Every structure is written in C-alpha cells, then in structure tokens.
Amino acid sequence: MLEVQSLHAGYGQMKVLQGVDLNIQQGEIVALLGSNGAGKSTLNNNISGIYTPTAGAILFEGEDITGLRSEQVVQKGIIHVPEGRRIFPNISVRENLELGSYLRGQQNRKANLDRVVGVFPRLQERFSQLAGTLSGGEQQMLAIGRGMMAEPRLMILDEPSLGLSPLLVEEMFGLIQNFNKTGLSFFLVEQNVMQSLEIANRAYVIENGKIVLSGNTDALLNDPELKKSYLGV
C-alpha cells in the first residue's frame, strides 16, 4: 500500500533521513520505533507532503507521490495525525471535526460525524465546547476523530499516547485495533515500545535516520538488541 524507497530528507543543510526503506501492506498496523531525534517525525512529514525529500521515492498504491503537496496527499487518502494533536483550540469540537472533511469526505460528512461520535461519545457531549478547553485525552480523541472524518485509507499516528494517563493509553491502543479490524491501515509512530509491538503486525526501528531493525513483532520482541536498547533488559 505504501512503499518508501531509499528516502533521504532533512532541513536545509541538516541531513536527517539517510536512505530509509519500508513498506506497509493493506490492512496492516506497522510501528516505527525510535528515540527522540531519530527521524520519526521527519519521515512522517515527508510522507504526508509537509516537506519534500531530497532523494528517494514514496509510492502509495503503486503511484509515485514523492513531492506532492500535503493537500494532494490527503486527497489520496493518507491522513496524518501529528504529534501534539494540533487541534484548533479557539473553535468548537464540532467545527474541528467538520474541518477534517474539508478536502476529503465532504459528501459523507454527516455519516462520518455520526461514526466518530459513536466511537468517541465524549466528543458529542462537548460539541459546542472550545476544543482548547478539553482534557489531553479528549484532545487526542478529537485529533483522531478529525482524521477519521477524511475517510482515511492509511492513517499516520505520531505519538498518540504522548501525555496520556496509563488508562487512556490502553483505551487509545484498543481503539486503534478496533479501527484496524474495519480494514484501516495504520503507520504507528510511538515511543511506547511494548504496547506498540503488542498491536502491530510488523515494526521498524530507526536510529540516526536509518532503519536498523525490522521484522514481525513477535521476532522483534525477542530481539536482544531491541531489548537492550529500548526495554532495558
């Protein structure tokens, strides 16, 4: 579904990604693991068209989308829920959700809104409330719900558990699994290694802009290098 080929990218003279290769199949949850500064968000931002890579290619469903603008990438069905939620704090919860269908999913806006509040009933209770007054967990629900309004084919989630309580983290990962059961593919970028590996089909580990480990999650859970570097055992 998504194929990243020998991708190089950075910011001005600063090189971040150095020949990244990865792929995501239809219906998969694929996790990307790595420490702060390893290149995770840079990869997401290049896939979603916020930045343009300096070399390599990004293919989506066989089509070369390298260098497309972010709005064009959204129209293809790749929806990026960025780190930090990035909601619009000074407009209502409902308006935030409706903006999710600005470029894609407009014709089914009402049905999609009903679907989102069916999954996140707390959002319906707060429809008229300013989004910036929501709790951290509710803001994360809103960010994901806004992404769902665009009828994603592939959803990129960047640190969805960041700043959430352990109970909400469990709930968040459960929701990802439930969405995945409907056929939605996920690229999950997380520092929460254990829970990511528990729900993902496959995973990649990135260090200093390069993929250093990859494979099925069962194999990675037993990889001594991963345990040493990320689990402290």
Image: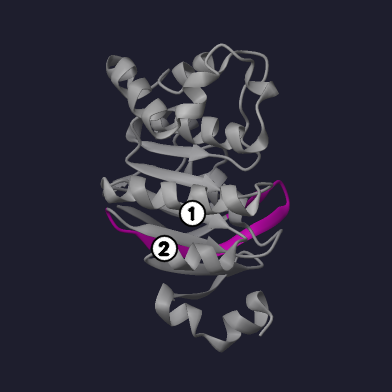
Helix, strand or loop status at disc 1: strand
**How far from the left and from the top, in percent, is residue 2?**
35, 53
> Nearer the N terminus, badge 2 or badge 1?
1
**How far from the left and from the top, in percent, is residue 200?**
41, 63
Q: Residue at x 42, y 60 (%)?
A: 30
Q: Is residue 24 magenta?
A: yes
| Residue where numbered disc 2 is placed | 200
Query: In the rendered structure, which amino acid carries the disc numbered 2?
Result: Ala
Within the image, what quadrant is residue 104 found in?
top left
| Residue where numbered disc 1 is placed | 188
In what quadrant of the picture does the C terminus appear?
A: bottom right
Near mark 1 (Cα within 10 A), the count class, few <14, some 14-19 or many ≥20, is many
**Taking 27 as reference, is 168 left or right?**
right
Q: Residue at x 53, y 35 (%)?
A: 141
Tag on residue 221? none
Say which of 13 and 192 sits in front.
Answer: 192
Can I make out residue 10 in this image? yes
**Taking 13 as reference, is 196 left or right?**
left
**Taking 123 as reference, is 186 left or right?**
left
Segment colored magenta: 9-26
Q: Residue at x 57, y 67 (%)?
A: 193
Say which of 66 and 157 sits in front.
Answer: 157
Q: Is residue 174 magenta?
A: no
**How far from the left and from the top, in percent, is residue 150?**
38, 28
Query: In the rendered structure, which amino acid carries the disc numbered 1?
Result: Leu
**How far from the left and from the top, in percent, is residue 87?**
61, 27
Say which of 184 and 46 sits in front.
Answer: 184
- Whether pointer 2 and pointer 1 mark residues with C-beta atoms closer than 8 Å, the reply is yes
Give the dominant element type of the magenta stretch: helix, strand or loop: strand
